[in-house]
Amino acid sequence: LKILKYGTNPIDGQTTGTSGMRKRAKVLVSNPKFLPNWIQSLFNALGGRDVLEGTTLIVGGDGRFYNTVAAQTIIRMAAAHGVKHLVIGRNAILTTPAVSAMIPARKAVGGIILTASHNPAGPDGDWGIKYNTGAGAPASEGLTDKIYQETVGINEYFLADLGIDINLSIEGTTSFADGAFTVEVVDPVAEYCDLLESIFDFNDIKKLLARSDFSLVFDAMHASTGEYARVILHEKLGAPLSNLLNEIPLQDFGGGHPDPNLTYAAELVRMLDPRQTPDAPQFGAASDGDGDRNMILGRGVFVSPGDSVAIIADYAARAIPYFRGKQLKGLARSMPTSSALDRVAEALGIPVYETPTGWKYFTNLMDADRVSICGEESFGTSSEHIREKDGLWAVLSWLSILAYENRDSPIGSLVTVEDILVGHWRRYGRTYNMRYDFEGVSKEAGDHMMNWLREMVDGVAPKHPEIAEIDEFQYKDPIDGTVASQQGIRVTTKDGGRVVFRLSGTGSAGATIRVYFEQYQKPSSSFTVKDPKDVFRNLVKKAMGFAKIPEITGRTEPTVLT
Ligand code: VG1
Ligand code: CO
């Protein structure tokens, strides 16, 4: 292989946030050295040719604009660093969970995922990239720091001269220099689907989907999961193709925002609402751009992500073949996520861990056999079967729970998503949750708000009279002792509500303020179902006041409410 060396200079701002590096696509298009600089820095941080020689590398992404262009560069750079075998999904598509599954299965050194997840795509949208290690887990903070340090001192990068571009639209293997380097374009779904088939009973789910009193809709939001939904939900499980919405992946996600929440998946929510859609289906689900998030809806009900992970954990040993008859090792949730999971852990007699936001904090616990199922309030749920969150796994988990509950129920008396939810609340009580996002705020305003709250934490400013306790979350990894500080301000109010404030780490410009609300309602016989918006009316008012949000940001309403 002929290797070409190029001179370069460091480019500012090649930092990694909660989940990979995210930039405006324009930034990459206008500077052809942007991507090679970062990839070279990644390869250097991994140990260069000494480590990469003879290895396998997995590459895939969410199907967005610039991914296929980026893939050709990554292929050449991998070849230049001695990678022997590069596996890439057709059209450079592989969901995050698929990459996470394929890395250990193919004994790969790691995987590169071309995604900015739910951020809008296209020439005017965002672009992003993340690296997952040999276990299939998101790069640790230690590794992302190392990559960043490399970007700051970079002065050269290397590309192999392959002579041709790889045709990414056709499956097959292309070999260079007598097999010194091979590129295998694979079906994006097959290996991941095999894994799901080993976890769930597809026959049981198929029977549920065949019932005349059950129907499902799935919204792929024009991102990568359309490919997966077609094979798994339609071909394997028998859902009609017409019940898959927006299932064709598009480079700009059809102009949409594939963030499955009550704001951005409003169309799906309407479809499931019997007041607006008379023959609303019994089950609805959606995924984000790279397939690691999920939203679960029943006819007329929304399953909050905090309830979803708690219910999945509660049913796992009965309803999911992978866990059947087993004791779960433990559970984990990110700090802003609902404490509903804690009550299930208590009932199961297993530990529960509270980690900072971002999946990377769960994977050490999984590798150490401490946890089996984890979840985040941001619609991420998964288990130890891989080292990432997994949207379709959550969907199939819910379908398995429904199949289990309906194993003997006659047609016409279906146990519904709502029945399962209400059953859970009756037993454990209900943990109400709501999140406000203030997107597109200036970085200064975001920092200003956090610093103001910090003054109350540090006692520099007096605590607002409504506040009972205020602190800043810090996490010490129980496995390797690494400390993550400044992971969100936690407030408990005198009337028992909880509010968490943090800044998003996945944006590409400015700041997004996230405010999480939580209130617990004990189980009782006179259990009433309330609308979270009503439950939180007072708490929201208080939080807006003591965090001075209108004053500091000029905003009185969030851009996302979920
Ligand atoms: C958000 C979510 C977090 C999630 C992260 C990556 O981070 O809050 O729970 O793990 O996105 O998800 P932040 O820093 O913006 O709040 V994904 O689907 O983009 O990999
Ligand atoms: Co995602």
Image (spheres, grey):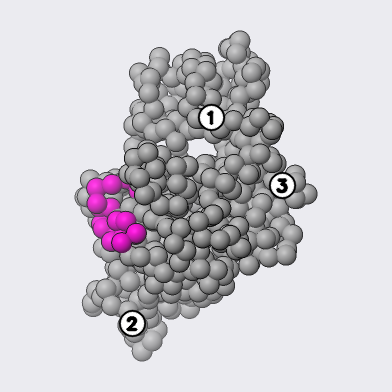
Q: Which mark is residue 172?
A: 2
Q: In front of the other: label 2 or label 1?
A: 1
Q: Are marks 3 and 1 in contact (CB under 8 Å)?
A: no
Question: Could you tell me which residue is drawn at 60 percent across and 53 percent down?
Answer: 312
177, above or below 477, in the image? below
Q: Quadrant of the C terminus?
A: top left
Assess whether mark 3 and mark 2 are in contact (beta carbons under 8 angstroms): no
Label 3: which secondary element: helix
Please name whichever residue, 96 or 407, is drawn nearer the observer in this view of the structure. 407
Left or right: 121 with respect to 209? left
Other residues around mark 2 within 10 Å, as few (<14) / some (14–19) / many (≥20): few
Amino acid residing under circle 2: Gly
| Magenta segment | 242-258
The local crowd at label 3, few if under 14, some if 14 to 19, many if 20 or more residues have their Cα within 10 Å, is many
| Quarter of the image where one finds residue 41 | bottom left
Q: Earlier in the sequence, mark 2 or mark 1?
A: 2
* Residue at left offset 39%, top offset 68%: 234
Residue type indicated by callout 1 = Lys
> Which residue position holds label 1?
530
Front disc: 3 or 1: 1
Distance of mark 2 from mark 1, alpha carbons?
A: 55 Å
Q: Which mark is residue 82?
A: none
| Mark number displayed over residue 345 | 3
Q: Secondary structure at mark 1?
A: loop
